[in-house]
Amino acid sequence: EHTQVAIVGGGPAGLMLSHLLQRSGIDSIVIDIRSRAEIEQTHRAGILERDSVRLLVDTGVSDRVLRDGYEHHGIELGFGGGGYRIDFNELIGASVQLYPQTDVFIDLADARARDGGDVRFGVSEVSVADVTTDHPAMLFTDADGVAREVRAQILVGTDGSRSICRKEVPESERRQYFREYPFAWFGILCEAPPSAPELIYSHSDDGFALISQRTDTLQRMYFQCDPTEDVDAWSDERIWEQLQRRVNANGYALKEGPITSKTVLPFRSFVQEPMRYANMVLAGDAAHTVPPTGAKGLNLALADVRVLAECLERHLRQGDTAALDDYVTRALGRVWKAQHFSYWMTTMLHRLPEASDFDVRRQIGELTSIVSSTAGSTYLAEGYTGWPQ
Ligand code: DHB
């Protein structure tokens, strides 16, 4: 089989790219080893930047993000015994949308089905070949057990943090940048009403806690834990005790309810450069991972494919040989800003296992600087709501 763009990975990045390409009259085929149901059940972050919302609405994916999502004009920062609000609207006239990544995926998968997009979930034995030629290929066994080969002009790896496409780039042609963190997040979903109008990011002597939301009756919360933490060792009672303690310290109180999901989320910063190798390009988590604080992962993936769709159009329709390198330069500029923002939010709010009293007081000083300075608050607001393209 032939197509113009072969896309390995049918998460939000791959599906959005396929959607945008079709709008430019470019054919693509998307494959994913997971079933649609499996992807829909993967809990991820829930905050969309302003431009991510616009991309979904303005390109005709769906306006459900506006109807079913909740607009948030700010966040709460808790530290040093008090709570402080960062008002995005007042500072920069921007907001974010609380809308879970699983719903973004559902909207994109529905839009691809509606528009006749070629998306094949549940394939197996995926490999890629000939990426240095003008006919790169993805090879796989389809859901019916038939071996397939799809040839394209360009192959795109949107296959997530355990990308196989990324590994196609020879070591001599790539650079990998890592940072590990000595903590993780314990994430829960619970059946309770929201505890506050907006999200609470809370620094405390017992570690960080984030109080997020899903709906009027379902909430998402996280607390800093050891990366090796065993979720089965945590009863509901023990979880509530930790969460309450970490927010009560700053004057907040949580409304409790039955906990319906418990998971430990890894923390890592990672970038592979360049995001292109011959006729293969990488986008989203396949090229970079951010720690979850600040919810940049999905937003960064959507920003990547927005630029990539435009550059692929220039490459394929106008024969612009500089277009793919242009993608790499533009995408990486944003990637490193988001890497810094996620690292900064993470290190400002979490307690390091070996933290000294100096380290903790310095963090309080940093948080105080942010909330007491318009320049500091504005920097946070710009990063959180998303920099313009
Ligand atoms: C959520 C996750 C985040 O990492 C964050 O910074 C904000 C919200 C969430 O899952 O709702």
Image (cartoon, grey):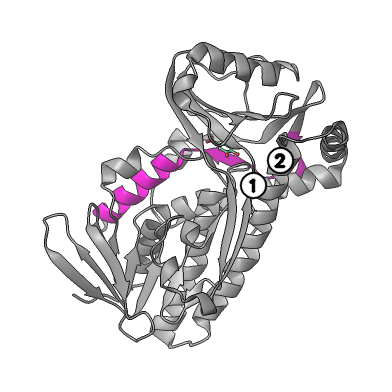
Question: From the viewer's perspective, is residue 222 above or below residue 290?
Answer: above
Distance Cα–Cα, label 2 vs label 1: 8 Å
Q: Secondary structure at mark 2?
A: helix
Judge by depth and name the residue closer to the eye, 82 or 53: 82
Q: Amino acid at mark 2?
A: Phe
Tally of numbered discs: 2
Q: Amino acid at mark 1?
A: Thr
Judge by depth and name the residue closer to the eye, 375 or 281: 281
For the point 53% across and 34% down, the residue is: 228
The segment highlighted magenta reads 86-113
Say left or right for 272 vs 386: left
Question: From the viewer's perspective, is residue 156 above or below residue 50?
Answer: below
- Neighbour tally class for label 2: few under 14, some 14-19, many 20 plus, Cα within 10 Å: many
Residue 154 lies in the magenta-colored region: no
For the point 64% across and 16% down, the residue is: 244
Q: Give the percent coordinates (x, y) of residue 137.
A: 28, 75
Our reading of the magenta stretch's main secondary structure is helix
List the residue tagged with mark 1: 385
Q: Which mark is residue 88?
A: 2
Is residue 116 visible to the viewer in this orientation of the structure?
Answer: no
Judge by depth and name the residue closer to the eye, 151 or 113: 151
Q: Give the percent coordinates (x, y) of residue 359.
A: 84, 37
Disc 2, disc 1: CB below 8 Å?
A: yes
Q: On the image, which quarter does residue 333 sit in?
A: bottom right
